Image (cartoon, rainbow, N blue to C red):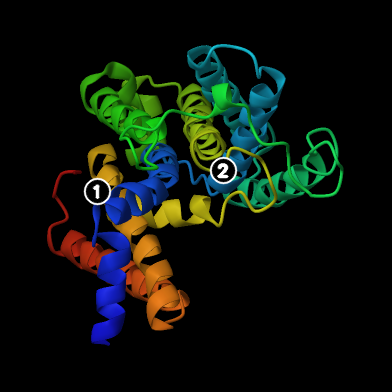
């Protein structure tokens, strides 16, 4: 047990490289998708499709990166971010349209769209974006201009982490200090009450929040291909969109705390890989600990809510 814990610590926090290049790099996509889930859940939108929206964001960003190899890096990075956000937002827009126009529950539509997104990336890396030899199911490696800059010399932490932190703080400010943020929270607290007493257009708020959530998840895909893999391939996401649900719930849907919980889950992933590599402990053990911790936190939150029903939202 001691050997496993030491291996976990070494992999997550034991050195500057472990923290900056393993923990924070793994936390970056979780930060974006955690914000996406938090925003959607705040409005009462059960967006379970962040995984698919991330994948579409990665496809969109990769297409731009491969199409603009000779542009200046600053322009290519901005174009990749915009393309990733647009792709993720459009993918979420499909589920939003199905909910508002046809009454399809977003839990069902977003989960099904995740499977479609996984099939889409498989087709793309075997078709229009496949590397020139046609041997491997992946895209060509990106040109230097499409590789996002690192923040610290000698470390792998890239621009995406800073963008995620800035977006988290901006989202918190919008939700707490703006009229639009109040509408989002009002709809999430009670859609009928918000519409009848507050004159809030529930459909507009729901659709806008849904699409904005997809944009944030799309940013995660752009960040991953631009800052980490420098190419598109199958399995670009090991389940970040699903882990993000735990990230958001543990943060109590507060964007500021999403930063903390994303780093925590990044540490769990980095430490788990080190445990498997250096101590022979299956990485699935970390997933079990994560699940038990999440269930415990949710149980405590439910118990506390029952004891203090008038407690204001965090």
Q: Residue furthest bottom?
A: 1
Q: Assign the N terminus to one quadrant of the image.
A: bottom left
Give the residue at x 32% y 40%. 189
Give the residue at x 64% y 25%. 65
Give the residue at x 30% y 71%. 8
Is residue 95 among the parts visible in the rendering? no
Pick the residue in front: 83 or 69.
69
Residue 164 is situated, as x and y percent measured from the top left of the image, at 36, 33
Residue 138, relative to residue 142: is it above or below?
below
- State how far apart marks 2 and 1 are (Cα): 24 Å
Is residue 183 among the parts visible in the rendering? yes
Residue 157 is situated, as x and y percent measured from the top left of the image, at 37, 40
Pick the residue in front: 43 or 30.
30
Give the residue at x 30% y 35%. 152
Q: Residue furthest front?
A: 154
Q: Quadrant of residue 273?
A: bottom left
Pick the residue in front: 51 or 100.
51
Residue 13 is situated, as x and y percent measured from the top left of the image, at 24, 59
Q: Residues within 10 Å of mark 1 (few under 14, many from 20)?
A: some
N-terminal-most mark, 2 or 1 = 2
Q: Nearer the viewer, mark 2 or mark 1?
A: 2
Residue to which mark 1 is pinned: 260
Mark 2 residue element: helix
In the picture, measured across the screen, residue 132 lies left or right of residue 310, that is right
Mark 1 residue element: helix
Residue to which mark 2 is pinned: 229
Q: Assign the C terminus to one quadrant of the image.
A: top left
Q: Quadrant of residue 259?
A: top left
Residue 311 is situated, as x and y percent measured from the top left of the image, at 13, 49
Pick the residue in front: 100 or 226.
226
Residue 289, relative to residue 83: is it above or below?
below
In the picture, measured across the screen, residue 93 lies left or right of residue 15, that is right
């Amino acid at each position: 047990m001691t050997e496993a814990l030491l291996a976990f610590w070494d992999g997550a926090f034991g050195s500057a490289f472990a923290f900056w290049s393993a923990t924070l790099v793994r936390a970056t996509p979780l930060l974006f998708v955690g914000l996406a889930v938090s925003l959607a859940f705040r409005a009462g939108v059960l967006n379970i499709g962040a995984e698919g929206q991330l994948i579409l964001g990665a496809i969109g960003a990769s297409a731009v990166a491969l199409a603009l190899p000779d542009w200046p890096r600053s322009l290519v990075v901005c174009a990749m971010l915009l393309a990733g956000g647009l792709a993720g937002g459009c993918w979420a827009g499909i589920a939003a349209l199905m909910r508002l126009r046809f009454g399809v529950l977003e839990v069902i539509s977003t989960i099904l769209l995740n499977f479609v997104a996984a099939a889409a990336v498989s087709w793309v890396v075997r078709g229009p974006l496949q590397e020139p030899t046609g041997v491997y199911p992946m895209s060509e490696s990106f040109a230097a201009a499409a590789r996002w800059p690192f923040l610290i010399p000698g470390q792998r932490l890239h621009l995406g982490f800073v963008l995620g932190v800035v977006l988290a703080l901006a989202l918190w400010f919008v939700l707490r200090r703006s009229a639009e943020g109040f509408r989002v929270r009002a709809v999430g607290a009670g859609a009928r009450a918000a519409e009848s007493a507050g004159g809030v257009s529930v459909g507009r708020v729901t659709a806008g929040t849904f699409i904005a959530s997809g944009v944030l998840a799309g940013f995660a895909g752009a960040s991953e291909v631009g800052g980490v893999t420098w190419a598109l391939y199958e399995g670009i996401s090991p389940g970040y969109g699903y882990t993000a649900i735990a990230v958001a719930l543990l943060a109590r849907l507060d964007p500021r705390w999403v930063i903390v919980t994303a780093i925590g889950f990044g540490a769990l992933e980095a430490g788990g890989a080190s445990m498997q590599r250096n101590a022979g402990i299956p990485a699935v053990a970390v997933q079990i600990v994560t699940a038990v911790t999440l269930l415990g936190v949710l149980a405590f939150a439910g118990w506390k809510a029952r004891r203090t029903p008038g407690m204001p939202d965090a």
